[in-house]
Image (cartoon, rainbow, N blue to C red):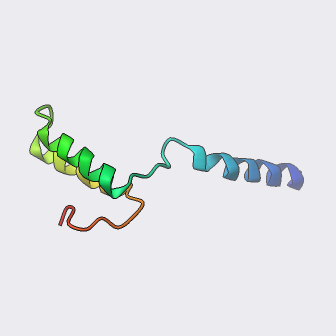
Amino acid sequence: MITALLSFGLTFAHVAPKSPYHWHITCTDFKKRVLALQADPNFTNYQKYQLARYLATKLDEPCKGVLS
C-alpha cells in the first residue's frame, strides 16, 4: 500500500512540471507581448494592465523597466 502511494506520488511529481500551467516567458518575449497587447483594441486599458501583470508573473528572469 505504501509502495503504491509512493509510486503514485513520484509519478505525479514527474508529470506535474509538464502541466500547461507551468510555463515561463523571457524578458524580450514579455516586452513584445505587452506591446502587442497595448495595440489591441479588443481590451480595455484595465484588462491590458491585468494581462500584463499576469504575464509578469511568468517571467523567468528579471526584467527591468517593466510595469514600474
Reply above or below: 40 against 12.
Answer: above
Image point 31% across, 54% down: which residue?
28
x%, y% of residue 18? Answer: 59, 44
Judged left or right of residue 38, residue 60 is right
Q: Nearer the viewer, residue 43 or 59?
A: 59
Q: Nearer the viewer, residue 37 or 4?
A: 37
x%, y% of residue 39? Answer: 12, 39
Reply above or below: 11 against 63.
Answer: above
x%, y% of residue 8? Answer: 77, 48
Image point 26% across, 55% down: which residue?
53
Judged left or right of residue 51, residue 59 is right
In the rendered image, the residue lying farthest to the top is 42
To which quarter of the image does residue 40 belong? top left
Image point 48% across, 45% down: which residue?
21
Reply above or below: 35 against 56.
Answer: above
Judged left or right of residue 29, residue 45 is left
In the rendered image, the residue lying farthest to the front is 28
